[in-house]
Image (tube, rainbow, N blue to C red):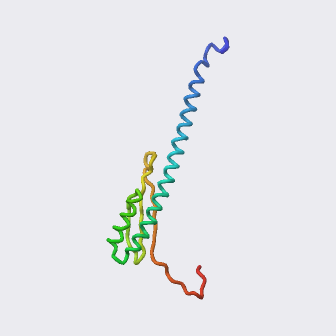
């Protein structure tokens, strides 16, 4: 510190250090939320996929039995069943999974899936 500035710069390094720490902390929290959201989305999609397969396998027993089976699968994967219904033999499922490190307004991730029998194709034609 020089005699000329009269001590005006005194303590400015502390302010800059506090601002830097706040910025680094903000970036860290946003990064952790983003990673947790991606993991939750994968968990919700996997739960919906497996639940749709389970529901399609039980479609012959009716919509209620198929959706009960889907709900058991989704809950076993740590998610919640948001929607389930049969469209013919196809099972349509939506699952929600909680985000572990959430910011306000973004606390769940969702995944949707559809499963059902494969439609046989004519062996003489190529699939499109």
**Image height check: is 103 above or below 11?**
below
Position of 68 with respect to 90 (left or right) is left
Position of 79 with respect to 2 (left or right) is left
Position of 74 with respect to 13 (left or right) is left
At x 48%, y 56%, the residue is: 41
In x, y percent, where is residue 73? 39, 63
In x, y percent, where is residue 92? 42, 69
Which picture quadrant has residue 24? Answer: top right
Quarter holding the C terminus is bottom right
At x 43%, y 48%, the residue is: 105
Residue at far bottom of view: 124
Along the line of sight, the residue nearer the viewer: 106 or 8: 106
Residue at far left of view: 64
Which picture quadrant has residue 48? Answer: bottom left
The number of callouts visible is 0
In x, y percent, where is residue 124? 59, 88
Position of 66 with respect to 34 (left or right) is left
Residue at far front of view: 76
At x 34%, y 76%, the residue is: 61
In x, y percent, where is residue 5? 65, 15
Quarter holding the N terminus is top right
**Image height check: is 27 above or below 47?**
above
At x 51%, y 53%, the residue is: 38
Along the line of sight, the residue nearer the viewer: 101 or 8: 101
């Amino acid at each position: 510190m020089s005699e000329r500035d009269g001590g005006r710069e005194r303590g400015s390094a502390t302010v800059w250090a506090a601002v830097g720490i706040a910025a680094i902390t903000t970036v860290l929290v946003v990064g952790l939320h983003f990673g947790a959201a991606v993991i939750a989305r994968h968990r919700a999609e996997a739960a919906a996929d497996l639940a749709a397969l389970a529901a399609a396998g039980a479609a012959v027993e009716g919509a209620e039995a198929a959706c009960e089976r889907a709900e058991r699968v989704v809950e076993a994967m740590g998610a919640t069943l948001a929607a389930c219904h049969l469209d013919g033999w196809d099972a349509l499922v939506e699952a929600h999974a909680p985000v572990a490190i959430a910011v306000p307004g973004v606390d769940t991730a969702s995944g949707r899936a559809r499963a059902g029998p494969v439609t046989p194709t004519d062996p003489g034609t190529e699939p499109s």
